[in-house]
Amino acid sequence: MPHADNANGRFPARPVSGRAGASLKHTHLDAILAGRDQVGFFEVHAENYMGAGGPPHAALARVRQDYPVLLHGVCMSIGAPQPLDAAHLARFKTLVERYEPAIVSEHLAWSTHDDIFYNDLLPLPYTDDTLRHVCAHIDQVQAAIGRRLLLENPSTYLAFAASDYDETGFIREIVKRTGCGLLLDINNVFVSATNHGFSALDYLADFPLEHVGEIHLAGHREQSDDEGEPLLIDSHDGPVADAVWKLYDIVVERAGTIPTLVEWDGDIPDWPVLKAEADAAQAVLDRHAAASARDVHHAAAE
Amino acid sequence: MPQPNNPAGAAFAGPFAAPLLDPDRPTPPGVAGPGAKAGDVRYNVYRNNVTVSLIEALADTFPAVRRIVGEAFFRDMARLYVRREPPRSPLLFDYGHGFAAFIDGFDHTRPLPWLGDVARIERAWLDAYHAADRAPLAPEKLAVVPHDALPALRFEPHPAMRIVRSAYPAVTIFAANRASGPVGKILERDGEDALVTRPALEVFVRRLPPGGAAFLTLLCAGKPLGEAAAKASEAEPRFDLGANIAGMMEAGAFADIFVPAA
């Protein structure tokens, strides 16, 4: 569950448990502010708010008055063997303090090598060596921000021959060593399962759902691999696929009404389209919340 | 590629990273699909994500340049730049400070000698957009400075203020290609210096009057008003001090004034 250690008192506390939210896109700002309680929360990419001032901060500060905000880091490069960028970590910490996000998350991936920033979530082999540096980096981030970080499972297109762990085993070990929570991206599970020929259900059965503090849903695209078979691309530029909705239903049934984000980062539609996707996630959460309330009621009546 | 300085022995990153922006390098060793599946197309997804996302970042920063040269040409030019000067920071809104100089040296844009200056204005525009928030200098504060104190007065630049000098009509070309309407024939021939400011949330790009760029640059360098005005009018006989001060105040170019202790 998300920590409640985010209250400096500047923003009203609003729980995100059992709520669905959407990516915050500035093209939607007027439409969002024209209504009330449009979604349960908004999530932002931390790096977009690392400038000194200007319209990005004005917009986020305005949205933050009315909604919980979740802070999602994209460029910390936690999975790289080299040390974290201290300046970047300091900027991240500043955002956590300034906007009091309900949830703070980052990726099991890397994006910087030497001083070159590749602007993509690159994969890493799962070995004892990489486990050590990933855990050290998560420890460092959690110490800097003074709260728990959720780590997101990646979508990947290839695997390393050097890997000794499967992904779920690697992630379980990270949680055990660092005490971090997890952000379960169900679209990533589906994309990786297709790309690597494993069962998404088996992956979810192995995944430590009890540590999941947030779920991501998003759209993907289909291409072909060297053998002409489907290769799914985690593109975040369309509606959530039916198969991903089905997996989502299974996860919520099993793990409870975890706060859920619908991500949409490319080919951004009008606000009502994205809101409808978040509403669909909210409907799944509400259905399971009602069902579990009935179960409790029945149990009490017996 | 062994990395003896890395005690974790996690030497995967260098070999994986090197071909991402270098199409002449092969797929790194040790990566593949499931079973016996090949890794080439799969690795190329990463090459494509990296290259295309960085081209998109430049396209977002330089919309007027993109409109002038066309989408396909822009992407080809940006791809070459991305490979030559990849970002050194994860803050992509800070990327592309070398793009104008790259354009200046790019053979295929030689018929558009002003294009680099348009890129400079666009880069300054985004700098101003993300600059620290600060109230600009209030006219009342300047108005109450005693007349005999004016020559020694110094000006503190507003954090969003940028000056871009051009020997071409770069401001007119920039403005025409940032507007939504069609771009007509541009008749201006004279050089135009740009003053970029963001007094509140909106970025403004103005043409500076003759001598204005030299004058403001001197003030930004901490020169007193008297010296800046004298040097500006020495260099440019048309320099009009009153008009320049009125213009810079209206633009919100400065944040404060002070007289250094003697």
Image: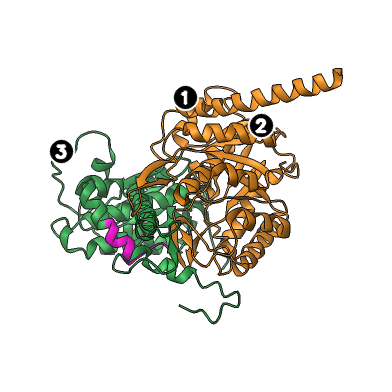
Q: Position of residue B14 (x, y in %)?
A: 46, 71
Q: Residue at x 42, y 28 (%)?
A: A270
Of all chains, the one bearing label 1 is A
Letter of the green chain: B
Letter of the orange chain: A
Q: Residue at x 46, y 44 (%)?
A: B199
The local crowd at label 1, few if under 14, some if 14 to 19, many if 20 or more residues have their Cα within 10 Å, is some
- Assess whether mark 1 and mark 3 are in contact (beta carbons under 8 angstroms): no
Q: Position of residue A71 (x, y in %)?
A: 60, 45
For residue B184, the mark is: 3
**What span is colored magenta in the figure?**
B78-87
Q: Which amino acid does the dot numbered 3 rest on?
A: Gly
Q: Which amino acid does the dot numbered 2 rest on?
A: Glu
Residue that badge 2 annotates: A253
Residue that badge 1 annotates: A272
Of all chains, the one bearing label 2 is A
